[in-house]
Image (cartoon, rainbow, N blue to C red):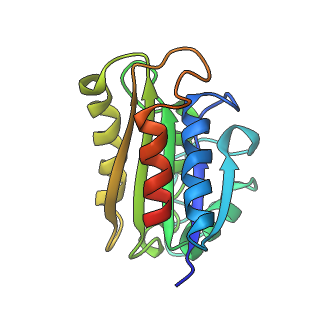
Amino acid sequence: MSKKVLILAGSPRKGGNSDLLCEAFIKGAREAGHETEKLYVEDLKIGGCKACYACRGVGVCFQKDDMAGVLEKMIAADVIVLATPVYFYSLSGQLKTLIDRTLPGYTKIRDKDFYFIATAAAGKPMLERTMDALEGFTDCLPGAKVRAKIYGAGFYKPGEVTGSAAEKDAYELGRES
């Protein structure tokens, strides 16, 4: 059965290691017959949440930016991939801002399969805080299932992840998604 796979690439650097792992996941998912769409969060206009709760009761943020469309795509997807480089032991600000802005409709992001991709120069244990933060988001979503976490640990320079076990894992998990 074909699924809709949405990849939210949280790196400000196209062609970086987390982006390359996204591409490997996409390749596997497409080979499995799934429809894929990757959004570069950096390219989207998404303002920070104002915590004003103007969305309460109406389910729409007052800010007129790209987030409403992203939220619709998240609701429509079967599978969501959250990908980020690790900065100061946490996810990128771009991806965190997107997550915060799901507030108007996060309860509609129901019954999704999630895959996490995180890359860093540090070793795998240092990526756990980032994975915990991503899982904290999915803990708030009804019926969310974290299917796998892809650790791109030990990669600093862009492209170092190419040919790695992490790239192979991303591809295989894309096929299995």
Q: Quadrant of the C terminus?
A: bottom left
Q: Name the residue rendered at 50%, 58% in the picture.
A: 174
Q: Name the residue rendered at 74%, 44% in the picture.
A: 45
Asked if residue 164 is positioned above or below residue 170 in the image, the reply reads above
Residue 124 position within the rendered picture, expressed as x and y whole percent measured from the top left: 29, 27
Taking the view exactly as shown, the residue that stands out farthest to the front is 163
Of residues 58 and 132, the one drawn nearer to the viewer in this rendering: 132
Residue 139 position within the rendered picture, expressed as x and y whole percent measured from the top left: 28, 59
As drawn, is 75 to the left or to the right of 64?
Answer: left
Looking at the image, can residue 103 be seen? no
Taking the view exactly as shown, the residue that stands out farthest to the left is 125
For residue 60, what is the image quadrant?
Answer: bottom right
Residue 149 position within the rendered picture, expressed as x and y whole percent measured from the top left: 34, 47
Total numbered badges shown on the rendered structure: 0
Asked if residue 34 is positioned above or below residue 148 in the image, the reply reads below
Looking at the image, can residue 134 be seen? yes
Of residues 58 and 45, the one drawn nearer to the viewer in this rendering: 45
Q: Name the residue rendered at 31%, 20% in the picture.
A: 123
Q: Name the residue rendered at 63%, 65% in the picture.
A: 30
Residue 18 position within the rendered picture, expressed as x and y whole percent measured from the top left: 54, 34
Taking the view exactly as shown, the residue that stands out farthest to the bottom is 1
For residue 127, what is the image quadrant?
Answer: top left
